[in-house]
Image (spheres, helix red, strand yellow):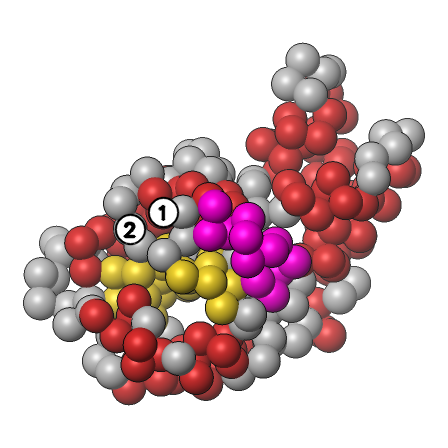
Amino acid sequence: MPDDNRCGVLFDVDGTLIDTTYLHTVSWWEALRQADHQVPMASIHRAIGMGSDKLLDHLLGPERDRDGDGRLRDSHDALYAEYWERLTPLPRAVDLLRACAARGLRVVLATSAAEHEVAALRAALAADDVIDTVTSSADARESKPAPDILVAALDQSGLTAERVVFVGDSVWDVAAAGKLDIPCVGLACGGTSRAELAGAGAVAVYDDPAALLDGLGDSAIATLG
């Protein structure tokens, strides 16, 4: 059941807390290239943040033959896994999580990463002592920009949409939050511009977790509680 007395912050992880956006871009580019799909990296980058199903529709078209989608996902996963031991948090990302927890807020990783990737992301953050809840792609029927993963994060953490803020790095994050009327703070460290994030509906945009931490007292997060 929801705990109406608690507030929290939902965080996207890839590109928001950990510097993975371009690793995913390169991994998808190579997986697509191996299958004879020539897709510019810039196009792939702009689709990162969607689930793999919607990403492939976006890049290859919804009318394509989907028989090869499983192989494309497997290729991406294998290529991306080569980076797992080198995953690096973005500037002061862990400090931001700890600062939110110190304010009495529940810290929720609302990630749609596959379950086998979540362990690598958590290991890179090394902040399990302040993390309340972690989701994965298995918790959502539809990927972003559908809001399913945020609904799952709310359900699992006992929080309500009225008492949370979402922090993400892509227009797909902002769109998903908007469908639940959750304020979304945008971070430009995933490679999406401040103007694009603001134009998509982000209530504020910061360069990276360090900038949000520096401005935490004046941010939407400070209004929780």
Q: Nearer the viewer, residue 160 or 118?
A: 160
Label ID, residue 182: 2
Overall secondary structure of the magenta stretch? helix
Residue identifier under label 1: 177
The stretch in magenta equals 188-199
| 1 or 2: tag closer to the N-terminus | 1
Query: Where is residue 105, by image quadrant?
Result: bottom left
* Relative image position of residue 165 (x, y in whole percent): 30, 61
> Dot 1: what SS?
helix
| Crowding at mark 1 (Cα within 10 Å: few <14, some 14-19, many 20+) | many
Q: Residues within 10 Å of mark 2 (few under 14, many from 20)?
A: many
Give residue 17's position: percent from left, percent from top. 53, 69
Please name the amino acid that badge 2 sits on.
Answer: Ile
Q: Residue at x 71, y 53 (%)?
A: 24
Residue 205 on the magenta segment: no
Nearest to the observer: residue 84 or residue 220: 220
The answer to whether residue 122 shows anywhere in this view is: no
Asked whether the residues under the numbered discs 1 and 2 touch, taking CB atoms below 8 Å apart as contact, a structural biologist would say yes
Q: Which label belongs to residue 91? A: none
Q: Quadrant of the N terminus?
A: bottom left
Q: Residue at x 56, y 41 (%)?
A: 50
Above or below, comparing residue 211 to residue 58 in the picture: below
Q: Amino acid at mark 1?
A: Ala
Magenta stretch encompasses residue 197: yes
Q: Is residue 48 above or below residue 208?
A: above
